[in-house]
Image (cartoon, rainbow, N blue to C red):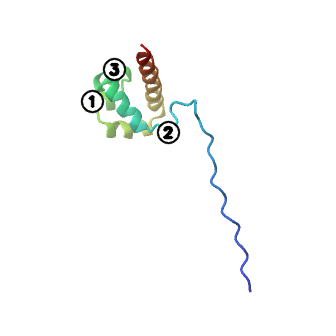
Amino acid sequence: MSTPETPPPAPPANKPAQPRNPLHGVTLEAMVVGLADYFGWDELGRQIPIRCFQIDPSVGSSLKFLRKTPWAREKVESLYLFMLRDQRRNAQD
């Protein structure tokens, strides 16, 4: 009795590159840390008024909340994009 040949493994699916997407490859943790470094927790809590930024803020508590709350994550992503644009503008001056 012969065993049937197994087909070769399928090549890994290539994900399309996203060269124009500034959020591609940026983790949520990197966004929160970058925003906290750029604005500080007080200003970040004013820009995005959520408790995890205003009361005893930490990266861990923020990540826990943002992973469960899509609307808040969208606000963080939007502010992160603003920060990147602002940094680029300041670098050109």
Amino acid type assigned to the residue bearing label 3 in the image? Arg
Residue beneath the point at 51% across and 30% down: 22
Q: Which mark is residue 42?
A: none
The mark closer to the camera, 1 or 2, is 2
Q: Residue furthest top?
A: 93
Amino acid type assigned to the residue bearing label 1 in the image? Ile
First in sequence: mark 2 or mark 3? Answer: 2
Q: Position of residue 33 (x, y in %)?
A: 35, 33
**Looking at the rendering, which quadrant does residue 18 occupy?**
top right
Q: Position of residue 17 (x, y in %)?
A: 60, 39
Residue beneath the point at 44% across and 30% down: 72
Q: Which mark is residue 46?
A: 3
Q: Is residue 65 above or below residue 88?
A: below
Alpha carbons under labels 1 and 3: distance apart: 12 Å
Look at mark 1 in the image and give the residue it sits on: 55
Secondary structure of residue under mark 3: helix
Q: Dot 2, crowdedness within 10 Å: few (<14), some or many (≥20)? A: few
Give the side of residue 40 with respect to residue 71, left or right.
left
For the N terminus, the image quarter is bottom right
Q: Dot 3, crowdedness within 10 Å: few (<14), some or many (≥20)? A: few
Does the residue at mark 1 contact the one at mark 3 (Cβ under 8 Å)? no
